[in-house]
Amino acid sequence: MDKYSLFVPNFLPSGEYLAAPSNKTCVGCGVSLAVRQIGKVVENFFDDVAFARPGKDDLFKGKTDAAFLKIKKGDSEVLFCLDDEPAGGVDNAVKKPMPVSAVEQGVKYVATACPSYPFDLMNKVQMALKVSGKSYIHVLCPCPAGWQFNTENTVKVGFKAVESLAFPLYEVVEGTYKLTNKTVKPRQIAEYLGAQERFSNVKEEEITAAGAAAQEEYQKLFGAA
Amino acid sequence: MESTAKLSKVTIDCSAVAKSDAKPYTPGAGGSVPEWEKDRCIRCGICYVYCPTGSVVRLGDGFFEADKKTCSSCGICHRECWLGVISMVEEE
């Protein structure tokens, strides 16, 4: 925990940076939460920033229509994928090929993060800003409107995503994978997918298959859970 | 100072609500705002970290207060408070 010690909530900068107070998002928005937490690290010290939803895009050869945030600071350039899964589907919720293909294409610093783990996210942003060159952070942002859960559960759903191994938090420094948040006792995948009403019509076999796929993906990267 | 001009470029918006499969709901959920029970609050600041709109304001004595103008009544602070100090109180 020593690396988190700088990020005790009460020591965070009190200003709101990037778009936090003036954004046009829904109630309980995960994207807004993630951008605000990123802003607490970057503050005003950057050269350029851009936010876009490019639509179906061939970026890193993984198809997605999630939102992207790009921050340039000095010679480092950080690309955030703010993944709120607008495409829907159980496969989309479990399989995240983007970070892996970013690693294969030689991006120096790649990480996955979730605003439910704010200090983990801020730590990764800080690491990415230290790297000269391009880095990529894939942020899972629970979306109450699209995923259909109550607005107060945004953070709880993020916890479930990580603890059910559907979205493990890791970072890749020059090709070496390292878990930053090791789940000791994994949850059932049904707990995560069942919390979202958009999957209420999905058959049970499909959910079990998704769980198996998530397990397989996890074991491929980090060995047995 | 010069970066303030660049900040206005960023507008965080969303495409999910335009989709037909999004769940309909009333923004503001009755217009309730969080209220802190100061006797039991340990000032950990977890409500401050998890607020998506940045409406939780830290006061001079270390306690917290909601900015009623920007609060969207999502209830995340109420749900995440470890001690259950925050209650959502309906506004008239």
Image (tube, coloured by chain):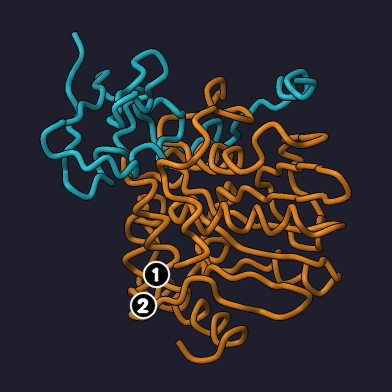
State the image coordinates of residue B15 (x, y, percent, origin top left).
60, 34
| Picture quadrant where residue A128 is located | bottom right
Name the residue rendered at 16%, 43% in the picture.
B84
Q: Is residue A169 left or right of residue A164?
A: right
Q: How many marks?
A: 2
The chain carrying label 2 is A
Which residue matches tag 2?
A: A186
Residue at the limit of the structure toward the top, as seen here: B92
Q: Are marks 2 and 1 in contact (CB under 8 Å)?
A: yes
| Picture quadrant where residue B29 is located | top left
Q: Nearer the viewer, residue A5 or A23?
A: A5
- Residue A113, compared with residue A38, is above or below; it is below
Circle 1 Cα neighbour tier, 10 Å, few/some/many (<14 / 14–19 / ≥20): many
Check chain identity for marks 2 and 1: say if they share one: yes
State the image coordinates of residue B76 (x, y, percent, origin top left).
32, 39
The chain carrying label 1 is A
Which residue matches tag 1?
A: A163
Q: Amino acid at mark 1?
A: Glu
**According to the colouring, which chain is orange?**
A
**According to the colouring, which chain is cyan?**
B
